[in-house]
Amino acid sequence: MFMQVIQGKVADRAGLEAALERWRDELAPGAIGYLGSTGGFTDDGVFVVLARFESEEAARRNSERPEQAAWWAETERCFDGEVVFMDCPTATTWLAGGSDDAGFVQVMEGRSANRDRMLALMETYAPRVKQARPEIIGGTVGTYGEDGWVEAIYFTSEAEAREHEAMPMPDDMAEAMAREMPADVRYLDLHQPIMISAGR
């Protein structure tokens, strides 16, 4: 699975929301290989979306569609300044992956010198995470470059996420995650996640 992450400061939220609705209704049906996307607005006015495709080739074909290019030329005017694109050639899911039923999504971005070990640890501990944090539905994580990664974690609700994050994790799991998780992780909280599923 290939994932493209797009983010930028928003100047016209209403215009961007309308553009997303138009993409869902008019462009998504023709996006061959599109698997779905998760996006939303942060409290400080940043919009981020994680779009998933069957392959990098499928994502490229979508970008090359004339209607996609025309849509983006109009949509990028809704941003204030540069829009950042991050291509993740490898993306995987854990537990139930992404879910349209999520009431809250937290996106994390970071770099890790031991990225492969960190991802393996996440997969190993996933069943125990579900036991300790039942409000977590699952997650999607993509990697780029030598050490970059982006992860979206899907929660049943923000209230449940905040309640459970204050509870202690098992000591061995907490120590392992603290050891492998870099300190400079960027968090983007999507209080009202926008999901556009394939086939809608």
Image (cartoon, helix red, strand yellow):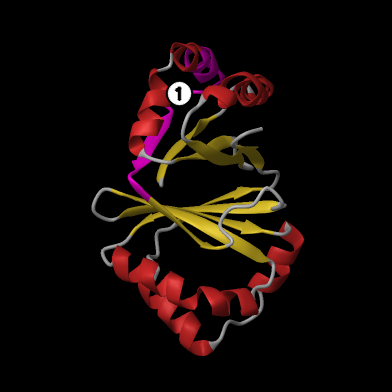
Q: How many marks?
A: 1
The structure residue drawn at horizontal position 28% and vertical position 56%, both measured from the top left corner, is 147
- 14 and 25: which one is in front? 25
| Quarter placement of the C terminus | top right
In the figure, 39 relative to 118: above or below? above
The structure residue drawn at horizontal position 34% and vertical position 37%, both measured from the top left corner, is 56
* Res 73 visible: yes
- 9 and 158: which one is in front? 158
In the figure, 50 relative to 72: above or below? below
Is residue 73 one of those drawn in magenta? yes
Residue, disc 1: 81
Whether residue 135 sits left or right of residue 97 in the image: it is right
Whether residue 195 sits left or right of residue 160 in the image: it is left
> Where is residue 122 drawn, in percent x and y?
44, 70
In the figure, 6 relative to 108: above or below? above
- 6 and 29: which one is in front? 29
Is residue 142 one of those drawn in magenta? no
* Res 49 visible: no
The structure residue drawn at horizontal position 55% and vertical position 36%, both measured from the top left corner, is 46
> Where is residue 83 drawn, in percent x and y?
43, 28
Whether residue 71 sits left or right of residue 58 in the image: it is right
Query: What's the magenta region?
Result: 71-90
> Where is residue 183 drawn, in percent x and y?
40, 65
Q: Given the image, on which type of amino acid does mark 1 rest?
A: Gly
Q: Residues within 10 Å of mark 1 (few under 14, many from 20)?
A: few
> Where is residue 198 drawn, in percent x and y?
59, 36
Where is residue 118, by image quadrant?
Answer: bottom left
**Label 1's element?**
loop
In the figure, 171 relative to 35: above or below? below
